[in-house]
Image: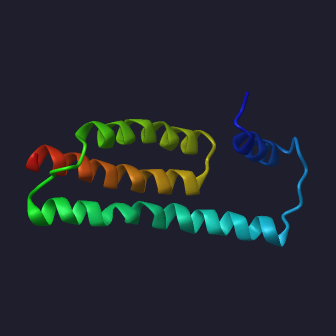
Amino acid sequence: MHHLGMRHKHERQTGLKKQLKTPYIDFLDRLTFVAGIIGPFTVLPQIYSIFSTHSAQGVSLMTWTLIFVVTFPWILYGIAHKDKSIIVSFILWEVVNLAVVVGVLLYR
């Protein structure tokens, strides 16, 4: 069974569920696009800390590697559904997640 959010989006895109583009839906679409772009920048302090101090003490390689791995399918999902906001957001997430992984490998 589809996750409710994905099913809703699928139904909107395929026309299975007719929904008018209300001002609320338009606002929500724009808000989630902006949040998807800004979100990955929340990792920048972690990246800065690792590379400026040359230390990854207390940063889990396993955690950040797993985050990197489980984020990748979202890029494929975005491509399959031609959803630019998902594609752009998760590519940015992969870049910052990879930067943390590389930092941990360099400075552990």
Name the side, left or right, on which 32 lies relative to 64.
right
Name the side, left or right, on which 12 lies relative to 31.
right
**At 78% from the left edge and 64% from the top edge, which residue is drawn?**
25
Q: Residue 33 in the image: state x and y as whole percent.
A: 59, 64
Residue 96 vs 37, above or below: the answer is above
Closest to the observer, 98 or 88: 98
Q: Residue 79 in the image: state x and y as whole percent.
A: 55, 43
Q: Residue 80 in the image: state x and y as whole percent.
A: 59, 39
Name the side, left or right, on which 93 lies relative to 83.
left
Q: Residue 14 in the image: state x and y as whole percent.
A: 80, 42
Name the side, left or right, on which 27 lies relative to 52.
right
Residue 41 vs 57, above or below: the answer is below
* Quadrant of the image containing the N terminus: top right
**At 49% from the left edge and 64% from the top edge, which residue is drawn?**
37
**At 80% from the left edge and 69% from the top edge, which residue is drawn?**
24
Residue 78 vs 38, above or below: the answer is above
